[in-house]
Amino acid sequence: MTGWPPGVGKSIFETVDSTNEEVRRQLAKGREGPFWIAARRQTAGRGRQGRGWSSEPGNLAATYLTPVEGGASAAALLSFVAALAVGDCLQVLAPGQAIALKWPNDVLLNGRKASGILLESFSRSPDVLQVAIGIGVNLAHSPPAEASNWVPTSIKDETGTAPDFETALEVLALALAARLDQHRTQGFATTREAWLARAANLGREIQVRLPAETLTGRFDGLDATGALVLGQPGGNRLIAAGDVFFPEAA
């Protein structure tokens, strides 16, 4: 897996506040997607729900901007596409290691969190969203466990060797290009099937923490919109957003 996706721009920074914020600034200047913004270090990286995302030198922080038709619901499905691409990337950079996907958009390496994904949408027209897919991959360092809601790790922690930054970016860019092409040509049903094939704890008991309650049930899959299907004695419950924990890790 070498090269660079044709027709895709690339800018690499030594330090930025956030690659998603830099994408926002590039858009404001009139730059058109698709393109990647990558940084060797972020000073104000963000995760889901406003959580901080540690970006130490040696790790990969990158955001891909792409136009998406179909509104917010179509844009949201790209989190599953991105998770698959990160999984593909880790298979190349950390061969032989166990890779799993945790709903909605975490990627686990040997059961620990090695990557996070944050999607943000910017509108330029009523019909087309500009979707920023922010991806952080722990190549060389992982944050302290107390700073994360899931035990973190890095590729170096698991394999003993940290991949080169630019090599990792190239592998990720090619993997995402391939998964996006698959999604566009074959639809979410194919993306969903591929995601579920890597899903952590599928068919097993999980805990879903929501703002006002915590639910326990069986992880029965995803529906056609990407919502988590939680099997409970009274019937299935669909979860559009929440934090998933496994009983043994909670």
Image (tube, helix red, strand yellow):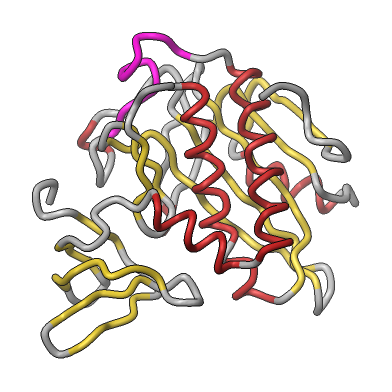
Q: Is residue 15 magenta?
A: no
Whether 198 is drawn above or below 130: the answer is above
**Residue at coordinates 66% horizontally, 24% vertically from top-left?**
1
Residue at the top extreme of this rendering? 161
Horizontal side of 133 relative to 5 (left or right) equals left
Per the image, is 156 magenta?
yes
- Point out residue 243 in the picture as x, y percentages from the top left corner: 29, 61
Residue 76 higher or lower than 62, as above or below? below
Viewer-side residue, 203 vs 37: 203
Which residue reaches farthest bottom? 234
Q: Name the image quarter holding residue 12.
A: top right
Q: Residue at x 42, y 17 (%)?
A: 140
Q: Is residue 59 left or right of residue 122?
A: left
Q: Position of residue 123 (x, y in %)?
A: 76, 68
Front one among 124 and 85: 85
Identify the residue at image location x=59%, y=18%: 165
Q: Is residue 210 above or below residue 165?
A: below
Q: Position of residue 137 (x, y in %)?
A: 48, 32
Which range of residues does the magenta coloring cover? 152-162
Location of residue 141 in the rendering, given as x and y in whole percent from the top left corner:
38, 20
Residue at 78% of width from left, 28% of height from top?
4
